[in-house]
Image (cartoon, rainbow, N blue to C red):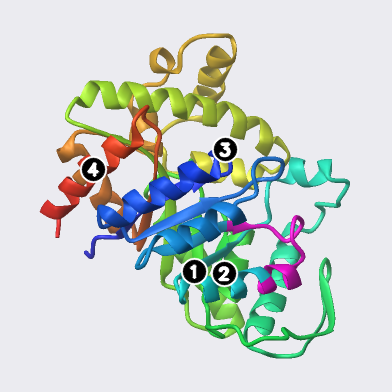
């Protein structure tokens, strides 16, 4: 059982200077990567990504994820190839369909998100390879389009974000790996690999082996304080995601799968949080065990082991304490004992 590499997640809710400082600290402490999450209407991540690429030397600089509604696939290819030039071949690319409700706020149709993903990956991959792309898709198309410069890595992997079973099959058919967002328990990755294998077999290709998973984290010597702090973050996330995914039951089912928590318990907990109760008083340890890594060195090590057993190859942590730099240093020391 091979330990996953460990990365750090930042996002558009942070000022670019903060993201760059975290990327520098991640490299200093020996983390493998920093991934930039972008959602509509928050900060675009490109300024922070470019700054992090210049401020570091060895760290993988990942986009997780671009969505093709914000950026047409031809633009994704243009930007990611230029970023890879800037970073010296260290850029990682994830593509996801985005948050449906926010896409619709832009006046765009979200009727065919899986077709959109297939189109986006095919167009982007072809352009990175230097091909003249003539592609007529169900959502996105390209009419004899070609990059006017050579991408540094024509074979750059394109990871697909997916949670629902149909999306996981598409990831197996067209993706080079899988990105799993927040709020999926460790065992979800094992299930996801099985479904991806079905899609890959249908497409006559090998099952992608890279699985990158995001996970909130609070780590420090005070176990109780760490677990209490992460519950506040989980309460905010559960309340927001539960509402966002009302229209997409497959995604909501993915959140609950293998959590050991019944749907009525989710609903009751979220209702109490929305009514004003503190998440730390509402959420029991099952929520922490399913949706976060939180606690002292032993609990951090045990959490990493669960993801390793499920087949996660890269575990990307969002440090959500009041002092993420301190938590990063603590985790870096723990990781030295796990080599």
Q: Residues within 10 Å of mark 1 (few under 14, many from 20)?
A: many
Quadrant housing residue 73: bottom right
Q: Which mark is residue 329?
A: 4
| Highlighted magenta segment, given as a residue range | 65-78
Q: 22 and 245: which one is in front?
A: 22
Residues under numbered marks 2 and 4 in contact, where contact means CB atoms less than 8 Å apart:
no
Nearer the N terminus, badge 3 or badge 2?
3
Q: CA distance from mark 4 to mark 3?
A: 22 Å
Q: Earlier in the sequence, mark 4 or mark 3?
A: 3
Sequence-wise first label, 4 or 1: 1
Residue identified by numbered label 3: 13
Q: Determine the residue located farthest toward the left in the rendered image.
A: 337
* Sooner in the amino-acid sequence: mark 1 or mark 3: 3
Residue at the disc numbered 1: 91
How much space separates mark 3 and mark 2, taking CA atoms? 21 Å
Residue beneath the point at 25% across and 57% down: 30
């Amino acid at each position: 059982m091979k330990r996953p590499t460990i990365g750090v997640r930042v996002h558009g809710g942070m000022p670019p200077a903060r993201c760059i400082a975290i990327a520098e600290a991640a490299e200093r402490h020996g983390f493998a990567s920093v991934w930039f999450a972008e959602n509509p209407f928050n900060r675009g991540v490109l300024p922070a990504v470019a700054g992090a690429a210049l401020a570091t030397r060895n760290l993988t600089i990942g986009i997780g994820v671009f969505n093709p509604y914000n950026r047409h696939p031809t633009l994704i290819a243009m930007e990611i190839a230029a970023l890879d030039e800037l970073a010296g071949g260290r850029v990682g690319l994830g593509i996801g369909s985005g948050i449906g409700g926010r896409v619709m706020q832009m006046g765009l149709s979200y009727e065919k998100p899986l077709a959109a993903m297939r189109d986006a990956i095919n167009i982007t991959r072809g352009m990175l390879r230097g091909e003249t792309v003539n592609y007529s898709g169900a959502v996105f198309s390209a009419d004899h389009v070609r990059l006017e410069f050579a991408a540094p890595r024509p074979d750059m992997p394109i990871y697909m974000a997916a949670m629902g079973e149909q999306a996981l099959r598409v990831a197996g058919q067209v993706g080079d790996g899988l990105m799993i967002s927040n709020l999926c328990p460790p065992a979800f990755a094992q299930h996801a690999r099985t479904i991806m294998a079905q899609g890959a077999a249908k497409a006559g290709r090998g099952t992608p082996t890279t699985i990158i998973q995001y996970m909130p984290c609070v780590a420090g010597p005070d176990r109780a304080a760490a677990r209490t702090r992460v519950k506040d973050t989980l309460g905010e996330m559960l309340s927001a995601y539960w509402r966002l995914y009302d229209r997409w039951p497959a995604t909501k089912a993915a959140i609950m799968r293998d959590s050991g928590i019944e749907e009525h318990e989710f609903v009751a907990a979220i209702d109490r949080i929305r009514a004003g109760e503190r998440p730390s008083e509402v959420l029991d340890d099952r929520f922490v065990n399913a949706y976060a890594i939180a606690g002292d060195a032993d609990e951090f090590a045990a959490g990493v082991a669960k993801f390793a057993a499920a087949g996660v190859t890269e575990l990307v942590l969002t440090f959500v304490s009041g002092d993420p730099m301190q938590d990063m240093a603590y985790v870096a020391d723990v990781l030295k004992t796990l080599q």
